[in-house]
Amino acid sequence: MRFVIGFGRFWWDFIIGDDWKIAAGIAAVLTAAALLVAETDLSDTAISLLAGVGIVIVVSLSLVGGALSAARER
């Protein structure tokens, strides 16, 4: 049982431990991409590109937000 708990804690720390906002944003982008696959006639390539751009935007906004809040604290 300790192995299962340790395994779960590792993945929690790996995915969410650094910044939960990035994890939530990426989950939202992937959910939107899955809905696009299921509900539209867009090609898989177009949806993959949109998802990639969405992930880059989420990470960029998180980095810029972190830098701005760190600058304000000085």
Image (cartoon, rainbow, N blue to C red):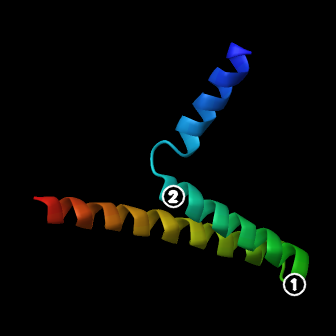
**The C terminus: image quadrant:** bottom left
Which residue is drawn at the image coordinates 80% and 69% (left, top)? 34
Which residue is drawn at the image coordinates 58% and 72% (left, top)? 53
Farthest top residue in view: 2
Could you say which is closer to the camera, residue 3 or residue 54? Answer: 3
Is 69 drawn above or below residue 42 in the view shown? above
Q: Is residue 55 left or right of residue 69?
A: right
Which residue is drawn at the image coordinates 89% and 74% (left, top)? 38
Farthest left residue in view: 74
Q: Which residue is mark 1?
A: 40
Q: Amino acid at mark 2?
A: Ile
Q: Residues within 10 Å of mark 2 (few under 14, many from 20)?
A: some
Separation (CA) of disc 1 from disc 2:
26 Å
Q: Quadrant of residue 37?
A: bottom right
Could you say which is closer to the camera, residue 43 or residue 54? Answer: 54
Which residue is drawn at the image coordinates 45% and 45% (left, top)? 18
Q: Is residue 14 left or right of residue 29?
A: left
Question: Which mark is first along the chain, 2 or 1?
Answer: 2
Residue 46: x and y in percent read 75, 78
Residue 63: x and y in percent read 37, 61
Is 15 drawn above or below residue 70 in the view shown? above
Could you say which is closer to the camera, residue 64 or residue 69? Answer: 69
Query: Which numbered disc covers residue 22?
Result: 2
Q: Are marks 1 and 2 in contact (CB under 8 Å)?
A: no
